[in-house]
Image (cartoon, helix red, strand yellow):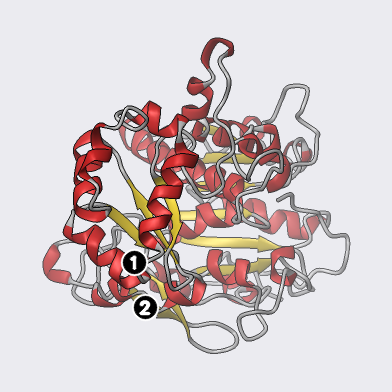
Amino acid sequence: MRLALSSGRSLRPSGTHRLLTGPSSLLSRFYSSKPSGHRTPPLAGVTVVSLEQAIAAPFCTRQLADLGARVIKVERPGVGDFARQYDTRVNGIASHFMWTNRSKESLALDLKQREDHGVLMKLLERADVLVQNLAPGAAARLGLSHEALRERHPSLIVCDISGYGQDGPYRDKKAYDLLIQSEAGMLSVTGIGKEPVKVGISIADISAGMYAYTNILSALMQRDKDGRGCRIDISMLESMVEWMGFPMYYAFDGAPGPAPAGASHASIYPYGPFVTGDGQSVMLGIQNEREWVNFCSGVLSQSELATDCRFSSNSLRTQNRDELKAIICGVFSELSAEETIERLDKAVIANANVNDMHGVWKHSQLKSRDRWSEVQTPVGPIRALLPPGSTKRADQGGYGAQMGAVPKVGEHNQAILAELGLSK
């Protein structure tokens, strides 16, 4: 997640800069754009400059872009964000990068070079927010800390994202998603038995990106009240530990923590996947005693189980889960997955298909709610999910998300430099 500073040659136009005159068409396009028929996006007119790599910071700033903010992504010349090279699954573009970098402008700068550093400092004069996930201390060495910037830019919001925070004994430790999952106790509650299993997505990065996003929104609201910017210090560890609140309190005062339960719930049962007669799995969940009674009669056709002394409360069902699982699987073995879901639906028992990624792409609920849009990329248009909360319907009074293109490295250098009054 840390941004390495290149000492290679800059893609910034070389030569002497001179001031330009006239309005910037690029700035006008970004500030005035909104989906036809919708209200102006909430963050239209807000400029975010981000020195970002990997997932946490790009995920944060992409969501700001979704809300209409102008996001200028500062990248290393030539190679750019190293997440561009993670894989080539989307017609040659990395899947992580495609997901987190739409609607951004790419500005390639070598911040070790005086002139390029000067471009960034000039850009910050017009910025509302600076987001960075450099290694702790690197921003300060570049003069980009909140302390260094606040006198000259008192309204600037500076958001620092790091693995462990900007101080403390872990400050300088390298921090990758799996390492943070481990430090935060996530691996102690996932997996089966003694074999820990990490969450299959970059959940520590995502949690940090979400808290950076919400804190920036709050800081913008606060600035509207008093005109002052602030510093936001986001730690991946602290973000992940916040999400571990339930298992932490479950283990309160030295009590045993939740046992890893695979895809089942550690403290509620039955809640998890069950195999049906056609070899497929169905996910179901019982949340209360009323549902348990309905499940016994309407799904298992064994009403007497509802008051069985082994299963008459959630604590007992969790304690005796192996016996109960055998009973449930015995019934489900005579049914197909479709028949099982029909019974569960009729009994109003929460259930779900166990989808793979292809099933999600084809999900009928997403299709029926018209949640797919399209974004342009260097390799052509790609389907993209609309951000939760946004809408395509102007009659609902909401905003239409900004679904702009995924940029090439340094694609906007010339336009941004011209906007700043800089040229060859």
Look at the image and tell me whether residue 293 can be seen.
yes
Q: Residues within 10 Å of mark 2 (few under 14, many from 20)?
A: some
Q: Residue at x 61, y 53 (%)?
A: 202
Up the image or down, 324 lies above or below 360; here it is: above
The residue most toward the bottom is 380
Choose top left, top right, bottom left or bottom right for residue 20. bottom right
- The picture places residue 39, in percent across and down from the top left corner, at 21, 64
How many numbered marks does the figure carry? Answer: 2
Distance from Cα at disc 2 to Cα at disc 1 = 10 Å
Residue identifier under label 2: 373
Q: In the figure, residue 90 lies in which quadrant? A: bottom right
Disc number at residue 316?
A: none
Label placed on residue 401: 1
Q: Closer to the camera, 368 or 315?
A: 315
Relative depth, front residue between 110 and 386:
386
Q: Is residue 369 above or below residue 143?
A: below
Q: Position of residue 285 (x, y in %)?
A: 34, 47
Label 2 SS: strand
Residue under the image location 60 percent in, 42 percent down: 190
Judged by depth in the image, the label closer to the viewer, 2 or 1, is 2
Q: Position of residue 175 (x, y in %)?
A: 74, 42
Q: Could you tell me which quadrant the C terminus lies in?
A: bottom right
**In the rendered image, the vertical position of residue 381 relative to residue 12, given as above or below:** below
Q: Which one is in front, 24 or 155?
A: 155
Secondary structure beneath label 1: loop
Q: Earlier in the sequence, mark 2 or mark 1?
A: 2
Q: 10 Å neighbourhood of mark 1: few (<14), some, or many (≥20)?
A: many
Name the one closer to the observer, 166 or 145.
166
Name which residue lies at 39% across and 79% down: 362
Identified by mark 2, the residue type is Ser
Residue type indicated by callout 1: Ala
